[in-house]
Image: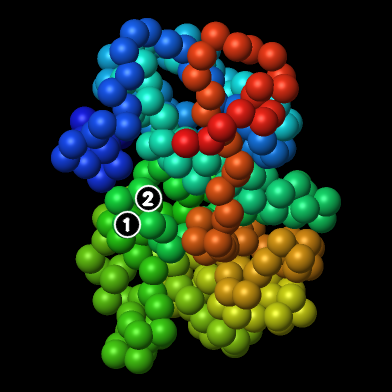
Amino acid sequence: MITDADIERWLREDVGHHDVTNQVPGETTGRLVAKEGGTVAGLEAAHAVFEYLSCDVTDSVEDGTRVEPGDRVLEVEGPARAVLRGERVAVNLAGHASGIATRTRRVVDVARTKSDDVRIAATRKTTPGLRGLEKRAVVAGGGDTHRLDLSHMVMVKDNHVAEMGLEGSISHFRERVSFATKIDVEVETVADASRAAEAGADIVLLDNMRPAAVRDAVEALADYPRVLAEASGGITLENVSEYASTGVDVVSMGSLTHSAPSLDLSFYTGSSGDSSADAGGPER
């Protein structure tokens, strides 16, 4: 999934045309260290960056691992120049992905206090060029990817309904999709939830509805056992438990990817391995 072209683009952006900073002789070791607790992800990308630069990844935890401050996440060895060239790209990718995984894990844990079955899903609100990294980070945090791109599932939104009507939109796309492609229909009222299910929706997305209205819609959709209920819009870590308790099958949240702060990670080189050096060493 991560190509040489991706890595070359990342490195070209960071290294530039005439890198003097990293022209360091000899061989070295390096370690990626957590400076705060969280769930790590993006390590496949970090591995790929170092391996592209002919460095060896000698030790690594797995994506989805929960770490505490001071824990070593990844260790590498190789030419000092190569290790130093790869470190910032690797740290940025892993820190960004780990932030998403950490936020997702927190949301999933809160939702699980109300329901063992509800799925916490991401959306298409991802960073261009980094969707694969971000979607995998959601999975590392215990979440669901939702659709990976426009071809993965049809989503009937308000603009489609404005052009073709609710039933007309569902009929239009039902005639064009493969038997394997689901149709997810966005609605804003309980009445429209039932209309969408009756017209042939596979999933009914309850958009920007308060928890009480979501609960009513879930009850209405009980008459259509093959139809999944999805809640989205305005759902946060603070209120996700209210939505999880409504009986919906899926809670989708764009904030898992577009608003997650990076997990604080640092990279250190050299032979020193004591914890004080890891906790307070320089950050490049």
The percent coordinates of residue 228 (x first, y second) are 57, 61
The residue that appears at 60% across and 11% down in the rendered structure is: 272
Which residue is under mark 2? 131
**How many neighbours does mark 1 have within 10 angstroms: few (below 14), some (14-19), or many (20 or more)?**
few
Q: Could one spot residue 71 in this view of the protein?
A: no
Q: Secondary structure at mark 1?
A: loop
The single residue placed furthest to the left in the displayed view is 17
The percent coordinates of residue 195 (x first, y second) are 51, 82
The residue that appears at 70% across and 80% down in the rendered structure is: 210
Query: The residue under label 2 is which amino acid type?
Result: Arg
Q: Secondary structure at mark 2?
A: helix
Query: Are the two marked residues, 2 and 1, in contact with CB atoms closer than 8 angstroms?
Result: yes
**Can you tell which mark lies on residue 128?**
1
| On screen, residue 203 above or below 179 | below
| On screen, residue 48 above or below 42 | above
The residue that appears at 61% across and 59% down in the rendered structure is: 250
**How many neighbours does mark 2 have within 10 angstroms: few (below 14), some (14-19), or many (20 or more)?**
some
The percent coordinates of residue 19 (x first, y second) are 24, 34
Q: CA distance from mark 2 to mark 1?
A: 6 Å
Name the foreground residue: 22 vs 140: 22
The single residue placed furthest to the right in the displayed view is 113
Name the foreground residue: 161 vs 227: 161
Q: Is residue 111 left or right of residue 180?
A: right
The residue that appears at 45% across and 47% down in the rendered structure is: 134
